[in-house]
Image (cartoon, rainbow, N blue to C red):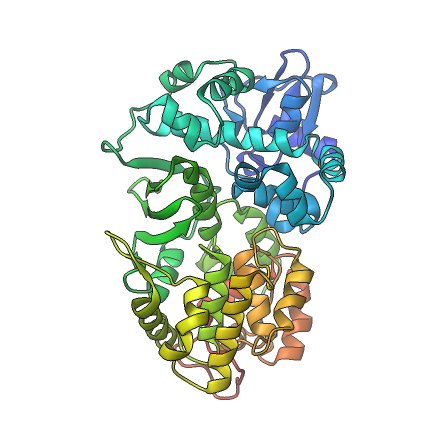
Amino acid sequence: MSFPVTDFDERYRAISARDTRFDGQFVTAVSSTGIYCRPSCPARTPKPQNVTFYPTSAAAHEAGFRACKRCLPEAAPGSPAWDLRSDVAARAMRLIASGVIEREGVSGLAVRLGYSTRHLTRLLSTELGAGPLALARAHRAHTARMLLVGTDMQISDVAFSAGFASIRQCNDTIREVFGLTPGELRARRKMPASAAPGAIDLVLPYRGPFDAAGIFHWMAARAVSGVEEATATSFSRHLRMAGGAAWFEVSQDATERLHLRARVAQLGDLAPLVSTVRRIFDLDADPLAVDQALSANPELAPLVARTPGIRVPGSADPHEMLIRAMIGQQITVIAARTALTALTEALGERTEKGLLFPTMSAIAEHGAEVLRGPGARIRAIVGAASALADGSLPLTVGDDGVEQRAALLAMPGIGPWTADYVRMRVLGDPDVLLPGDVALRAGAAASGLPGEPGPLISWAERAAPWRSYLSAHLWRAAPARPVRRVRAPQTSPL
């Protein structure tokens, strides 16, 4: 079976097999017990006539079910559907995870998506079984559970970190969703939290296999000094959140668990930060479905066998990602890293612990004084920063992919490679191919695929809807020096 699975019989076979691949993709509500579970729940498989499948835990809760205390469905990785799909429901889920409702309310979410509040509520209720408030509450409950079992934070701090308006609201929601008080939920954790006082140390769930070495190597090659730091088993960076400067580090331990350590200026930034980290490391991907689909092509099977569970890195900040992509056009990764470091040292905001990437306003005002290279390229970068700063160029994780691409292409100095690369990194679109990328085409040629844009585009149709992961494999397969016959505007992704 491969994602998406929507048929009742296929889903029932998945829960009968307790298949962990489907955890987070749907929940199973059982009328005879009044609970909902993840597909891999070890409890006895319920009778089909007692089962209802829901796309989200919020929908199951709205229907009157509570979370299973045994399998804790909220602890599963997130659904890969929100990247695979590009409809309004998927965009709403990405924005809800980024904390839009906590900051701007349902009306702000509706404005971002271009709908009235009433119509958006009706649309999400029909599509996902729950309205935006219920979806946001389910996300808060998930965050609160994660903090209760993964840290020693006081319950009052957990409430505000998860986005609840009050401790009472948090307590009531935890009781409704899990059938436990926050204290009882914390007491059920299997091991004591290991975070030092004042630190947050969480384990990040993901579906295996996971190419940790590859993604840490990717980060290390592109780390901007002062902002980011990477080793063979860790990546850390400073970033700007709604409440102020923040910092995080992701590392892998000997048991292959991923740990997140973080500091935030305001507790309300923690949940959006966790969502951002999950996007950066592509932790909600379904690697078995991707690997299975790509391996069906004989030319790709050796690449998948060499690197199972490859990931497509996301972005820490959409605006930053566009500037990084534009600076990286037509130059090497090393040269782009040098230019970005110089830009950050000159215009970035200094904190006690490190540097924050420059604001778009700073780049718009002073970028021309710092950036080096052709005048047209500098003007394009400064112009894009100015448009991002004044809001005339919207760029968020909740954008419609087609509209985002068109808006970017309308900007001077932004071509198809940059627009599509930003779509891949910012929206997490799993089906982007960059035929103008010289490293990707070199990897294609080295793998026995067409090395020219037209033939490569035609061949890659068989890899849909996973062409972003195909791109990642081809980048990995590129020889140290691209073959001479492969020519394109870009040299390597940033």
Indicate whether 67 appears above or below 161: above
Which of 406/494 is in front? 406
Which percent across, then down, holds residue 468? 57, 61
Quadrant position of residue 333: bottom left
Give percent across and percent down for residue 147.
39, 29
Residue 367 visible in the picture? yes
Q: Quadrant of residue 225?
A: bottom left
| Residue shown at 51% from the left, 30% from the top | 140
252 versus 137 height, above or below: below
Q: Is residue 446 visible?
A: no
Q: How many marks?
A: 0
Q: Is residue 248 left or right of residue 139?
A: left
Residue 258 coordinates in the image, percent (x, y): 36, 42
The quarter in which the N terminus is drawn is top right
440 and 34: which one is in front? 34
Residue sticking out furthest to the top:
32
Give residue 171's position: percent from left, percent from top: 47, 17
Give the side of residue 13 with respect to residue 253, left or right: right
Of the pair 144 and 436, the residue shown nearer to us: 144
Q: Look at 64% across and 62% down and name the residue there.
A: 404
Q: Is residue 86 above or below residue 191?
A: below
Quadrant in the picture for the C terminus: bottom left
